[in-house]
Image (cartoon, rainbow, N blue to C red):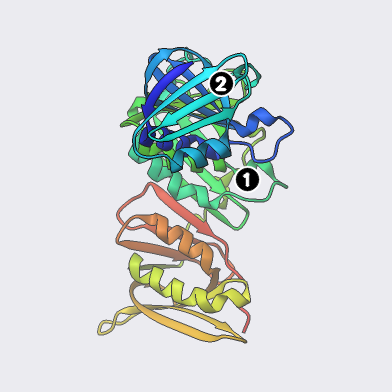
Amino acid sequence: MKVSCLQENLAHGLSVVARAVATRSTLPVLGNVLLSTEDGRLRLSATNLELGISCWIGAKIEQDGSTTVPARTFVDLVNTLPNDQVDMELNIRTQMLNMQCGASTNDIKCIDAQEFPPMVPPDLETGFSFDVDELREMIGQVVFAASNDDARPVLTGIMFQIDNGELTMAAADGFRLSVRTAHLPSLAGEPAHAIIPSRAMSELARILGEADKTISMILPSDRGQVVFRNKNIELVSQLIDGAYPDFQSIIPPNYSTRTVVSTTAFIKASKAADIFAREVGYSARIRIIPGSELEPGTLEVSATAAETGSNRTVVDATIEGEPIEIAFNVRFLLDVLNAVGTPNVALETSGPSSPGVIRPVGRDDFLHVIMPMHLGR
């Protein structure tokens, strides 16, 4: 193998794939990045056997070939090189990669590419096509609600369902639920269902900024994998086996009080309460008081800690229904408020011990259910 490419392109490609490198593995090759020439470009790939990421960069190919380079050494070294052309040549017999850039000359001991796990074949069926910006937004509105507890593996993933041109993504951890839908006529056809690890979806959202306008999702039959692919990137993830809970039954069918408030004001009030709520399990009290003909309604966010003190922020709100007092985990509130994406947000409540529902005002494609906390005194 003998190739040349720009240092900035190589550094960028490594930043895309490096997060998939295995940090602890009994297989040394999983700590390496695969370099391979493919169709006149240089392919960089990394995998931990659960998640694999590839990125293609422009390069001048003088001699085809492949090898695997220790990821940490390679990344650190490339980041120190000048912004210039990088020339790499592999000695196949010794598996030593010579890399030259400007005044820098380096020899890196590699592992034969044949020891690297086989990559997904490029001739898979086309699958479903998504708009990159919309898919990134959808992931951002649900991924934070997935569980980090491996005791219930299905809850560590995102439920991904396509049916009659409707895409639904849902995530829950037992304390909150996020559901995002999108009507995509291009998805009409065979239905699809999968539970994709939330980490894989987070990584996909991270690298989607480097993608084209669209990206394809492929569910190869009998492989237990999902593949997201376009011209320059590919992400492959193992799917989670199991049946996802019936999340529709968790969504309250009605409410007694609906509060509409500025999203920005609600975020600021929650951030202030968070400072004091840290000592009390992040519990913040929400007090909703309807207005009158002369005065607007108010939403009050407060938190009290024995050691630190207390905080109370009052925000004007439009309220339909009865006054109510309820407590929520303020960190959960901030997660969803930062993901809403609209100027105003609606909080629907039915009582201090019933779940609250948060919806963006002016959109009906997203909702978040959040379980209440004990009010205390």
Which x, y percent locates residue 143? 51, 47
Mark 1 to mark 2: distance in Å? Answer: 37 Å
Q: Write the residue at 35% across / 71% down.
A: 265
Residue tagged by mark 2? 67
Q: Report the amino acid beneath label 1.
A: Leu
Total labels: the figure holds 2
Q: Is residue 183 above or below residue 61?
A: below
Q: Is residue 288 above or below residue 57?
A: below
In the rendered image, the residue lying farthest to the front is 103
Q: Write the residue at 34% across / 55% down.
A: 341
Q: Secondary structure at mark 2?
A: strand
Which x, y percent locates residue 206? 44, 42
Q: In the rendered view of the protein, which quadrant contains the C terminus?
A: bottom right
Q: Badge 2 local density, few (<14 within 10 Å), some, or many (20+)? A: many
State the image quarter where residue 281 is shown: bottom right
User: Is 100 on the left or on the right of 303, as rendered?
Assistant: left
Q: Write the residue at 31% across / 32% down.
A: 213
Q: Which mark is residue 155?
A: 1
State the image quarter where residue 174 is shown: bottom right
Q: Badge 1 local density, few (<14 within 10 Å), some, or many (20+)? A: many
Q: Nearer the viewer, residue 224 or 295?
A: 224
- Could you tell which of marks 1 and 2 lies nearer the N-terminus? 2
Which x, y percent locates residue 279? 61, 77
Q: Report the amino acid beneath label 2.
A: Thr
Q: Is residue 139 above or below residue 93?
A: below
Q: Is residue 329 above or below residue 229?
A: below
